[in-house]
Image (cartoon, rainbow, N blue to C red):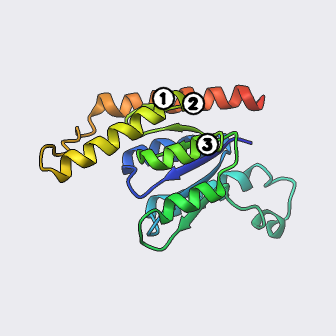
Amino acid sequence: MIRLYIDSDSLPVRHRSIVIKRIIKNGYEAWFAADRKLPDVLKAIEEDKRVRRSAFRETLTREEARKIGSGIHMEVVKSGANSADDRLVELALAPALAITHDIPLAERLIQKGITVIDDRGNTFSEENIRKRMSERENNAIFREMGLFTDKSKHFDEKTIHAFSAAFDKALMNLEKLAGTP
């Protein structure tokens, strides 16, 4: 079974839409962690239940079919530093895919054997995460000194396409590892 862990607080709705469609289509298990309920995820849970139940419409009674739940889980955590991160790390079981742009969270998940991508289509690995952590720490020092300000690039079509391609590639790799088509 393919599992996904999504740091949802900062993942744009358009990205979540790409992820949700794939989860429902392929029947993956997924955990979305945020400090609030996300309407699109709640709607996806209901859609996923409907899709999963429809496969058994002819063989199960209505009551039996209602027992079939969604593979999508909305983990609402208390507001606070790292609360969603801590919950995702607690839940994470390899092999799996996680989506976050939080570098410290990516490092923690990589240590658990999880494949991690960010919302811009970058893949984090054991080889590049130390460098990314170092860059993050240096940038924080520069910001404190007033020498550097974050000027994140907006999400354009090229960035969304890069995310979608990285997402597809990571899922293909996990499916090969899990032996699923």
Estimate the x, y position of residue 121 in percent, counting from the top left: 42, 32
- Find residue 31 and report its image quarter: bottom right
- Tag on residue 111? 3
In this picture, residue 179 sits left or right of residue 13: right
Type of amino acid at the residue the image marks with label 2: Ala
Q: Is residue 119 visible?
A: no
Given this view, does label 3 or label 1 mark the residue nearer the observer? Answer: 3
Q: Name the residue that disc number 2 marks.
A: 170
* Circles 2, 1 touching at the beta carbon (< 8 Å): yes
Q: Name the residue that disc number 1 marks.
A: 166
Q: Secondary structure at mark 3?
A: helix
For the residue carrying disc 2, how many other residues have a C-alpha within 10 Å: few (<14), some (14-19), or many (20+)? some
Q: As rendered, which of 20 and 165 lies closer to the eye? A: 165
For the residue carrying disc 3, how many other residues have a C-alpha within 10 Å: few (<14), some (14-19), or many (20+)? few
Q: Earlier in the sequence, mark 3 or mark 1?
A: 3
Identify the residue at image location x=81%, y=70%: 63
Estimate the x, y position of residue 159 in percent, counting from the top left: 32, 32
Type of amino acid at the residue the image marks with label 1: Ala
In this picture, residue 93 sits left or right of residue 165: right
Q: Is residue 172 visible?
A: yes
